[in-house]
Amino acid sequence: MRAAKFDAVVWKGGTYGLKLSAADRDAHLVREWRTIFLRLSGINELVEVNIDKPSMWEGNCRELISSKIGVWLKCHNKLPWPKGHPPKVTIECVGERVFAVTLK
């Protein structure tokens, strides 16, 4: 794993999440971690996200999902977004299992 920044797109299903590319998932996440922590810009607490699920590692889902992402987006006036133009974020590895997330 290399320390770096990468981009993701906001996703909406039953709740909100961040959709990663397969290449970024493979370069920055370790399946054995089971969970990671997101530091959403402007929020003091770390958000724990489950990555120990088949949808993260098989097929093309690859979403980091948490209801707290929706709250964060709402606080930044990003909900709702124009059809076909979801918000984009930058994700930066800031420690083992910890990733800072900022809106672009």
Image (spheres, rainbow, N blue to C red):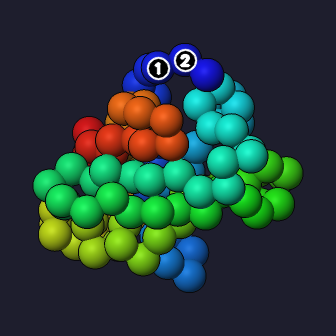
Q: Is residue 95 above or below residue 73?
A: above
Q: Residue at x 82, y 60 (%)?
A: 54
Q: Nearer the viewer, residue 95 or 14?
A: 95
| Residue 63 picture location, percent across and down | 60, 57
CB atoms of marks 2 and 1 within 8 Å:
yes
Residue 30 falls left or right of residue 15: right
Residue 85 in the image, given as x and y percentages of width and height: 39, 53
Question: Which residue was labeled with disc 1?
Answer: 3
Q: Quadrant of the N terminus?
A: top right
Residue 36: image x %, image y %? 53, 52
> In the drawing, what numbered circle is on residue 2?
2
Residue occupying the point 18% across, 59% down? 44
The image quarter in which residue 47 lies:
bottom left
Q: Position of residue 104 (x, y in %)?
A: 26, 39
- Which element is circle 1 on? loop
How crowded pointer 2 is (Cα within 10 Å; few <14, some 14-19, many 20+) is rated as few
SS at circle 2: loop
